[in-house]
Amino acid sequence: MLQRPPRQQYAAICFRVKKKQAQVEVLVATSRDTGRWVIPKGWPMTGKKAHQVAEREAFEEVGVRGKADKEPLGFFHYRKTLNNGVRALVRVQVHALEVQECLKSFPEKGSRVLEWVSPEEAARRVNEPELKVLLSDFGTRMQAAAVEPATKTPKPSGKGNGKSAANPDLKATG
């Protein structure tokens, strides 16, 4: 039997750095259908590059704005039940997005629970094994960069001045 190639989605690991504690936090949300913990992700959009789709999904699903890295952190796979009942394999390309702003109003506000947690806690919460590894590795890299700022280890957020306008004490709620 022939198998269809995986469908493609794009996602963002939305993060902030709490400067005083030099701690990295990532934003996780519950899915609208099953309530499992996820990161914002979505289907390709006409006229938008992968990292731009990740930025748009972060705005729509969890109400944050920021710049996503053009280069992906990695990929994970999962099975999605489509509207017609078919379970399709989906390949998700993940981009780091440093949060610059947390919005009070956004399209999916109220339909998800949002929480800022450590990358390790995020890895414990999500179901997909490959995403668990991506989150754990991301936390390790970011912590190493925070401990050794003089090294030439590039920060996953790519462009920017290293400052985050996101209020580190802001608790996002769905």
Image: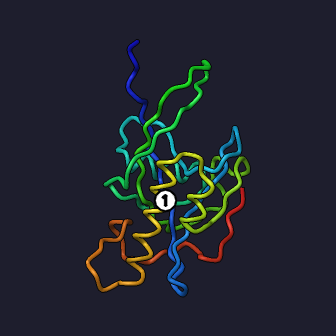
**With 138 as the anchor, is 106 left or right in this view?**
right
Q: Nearer the viewer, residue 111 or 8?
A: 8
Residue 115 is situated, as x and y percent measured from the top left of the image, at: 66, 62
Q: How is the image coloured?
A: rainbow
Residue at the image position 51 percent from the left and 65 percent from the top: 15
Residue drawn where x is 47% and y is 36% of the image: 43
Residue bearing the label numbered 1:
135
Q: For mark 1, does the 10 Å Cα neighbourhood hold few (<14), some (14 to 19), or many (20 or more) residues?
A: many
Quarter of the image with the C terminus is bottom right
The percent position of residue 78, horizontal first and vertical second, equals 51, 37
The image shows a total of numbered marks equal to 1
> In the picture shown, does residue 153 fall above or below 5?
below
Task: Identify the residue at image location x=40%, y=58%.
Answer: 68
- Check the picture and name the quadrant holding the N terminus: top left
Amino acid type, residue under disc 1 in the picture:
Leu
Near-viewer residue (125 or 160)? 125
Q: Secondary structure at mark 1?
A: helix
